[in-house]
């Protein structure tokens, strides 16, 4: 293979990476708009983050998540309820959105340094979700205390974490099933 062929292959790979990252960011945005009405409404945003990491890999999936967060930060209405802007990220629930990046980083670390086996990927996503919950909860408490007054950790966990654990684990299971199905299609 000539050096020109190598360069062309490298350029094609970069373009393909950009396409996958863009599609991943768009998928996260679309899933954040899908709200399932329950006593505590939730979106499919977490499902999309899991799916993008599983199907695109740690690096591309985390970059897709970063693009999603940055698009929202500059005002593109990619967040839940068709919202966007730095105010959403600086608001009480913004820490959970930023926490998705930690999920991606943990996924990269596990799949790069431990194994690419499915069980390791699932453990990485569960641990990443726990870190996302922890970061988001700390962020929520900080913002809430500044704007509304004292609130206890158990209260915040009751509002922001406990109602979402089972739905998020179900979303993780669904993401695993779908990602395994499309694995042969994505390079």
Image (cartoon, rainbow, N blue to C red):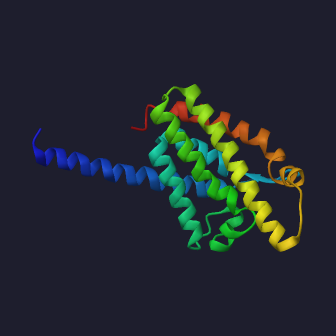
The residue closer to the viewer here, 53 or 155, is: 155
Which part of the image, by quadrant, shows the C terminus? top left
Whether residue 85 is visible to the viewer of this picture, yes or no, is no
Q: Position of residue 10 (x, y in %)?
A: 25, 47
Which part of the image, by quadrant, shows the N terminus? top left
Q: Position of residue 105 (x, y in %)?
A: 53, 46
Q: Position of residue 161 (x, y in %)?
A: 80, 48
Q: Is residue 64 left or right of residue 174?
A: left
Q: Residue furthest left?
A: 2
Q: Is residue 152 left or right of residue 113?
A: right
Q: Residue at x 77, y 61 (%)?
A: 140
The residue closer to the viewer here, 127 or 83, is: 127
The answer to whether 173 is drawn above or below residue 77 in the figure is: above
How many labels, in total?
0
Q: Residue at x 47, y 40 (%)?
A: 57
Whether residue 187 is visible to the viewer of this picture, yes or no, is yes
Q: Is residue 114 left or right of residue 46?
A: left
Q: Position of residue 172 (x, y in %)?
A: 66, 37
């Amino acid at each position: 293979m000539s050096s020109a062929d190598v360069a062309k292959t490298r350029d094609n790979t970069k373009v393909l990476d950009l396409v996958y990252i863009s599609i991943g960011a768009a998928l996260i945005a679309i899933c954040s708009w899908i709200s399932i009405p329950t006593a505590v409404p939730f979106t499919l945003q977490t499902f999309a983050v899991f799916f993008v990491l599983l199907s695109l890999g740690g690096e591309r999936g985390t970059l897709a998540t970063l693009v999603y967060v940055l698009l929202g930060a500059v005002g593109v209405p990619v967040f839940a309820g068709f919202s966007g802007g730095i105010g959403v990220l600086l608001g009480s629930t913004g820490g959970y959105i930023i926490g998705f990046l930690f999920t991606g980083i943990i996924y990269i670390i596990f799949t790069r340094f431990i194994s690419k086996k499915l069980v390791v990927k699932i453990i990485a996503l569960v641990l990443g979700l726990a870190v996302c919950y922890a970061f988001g909860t700390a962020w929520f408490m900080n913002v809430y205390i500044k704007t509304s007054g004292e609130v206890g950790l158990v209260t915040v966990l009751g509002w922001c974490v406990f109602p979402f654990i089972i739905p998020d684990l179900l979303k993780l299971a669904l993401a695993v099933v779908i990602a395994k199905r499309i694995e042969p299609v994505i390079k």
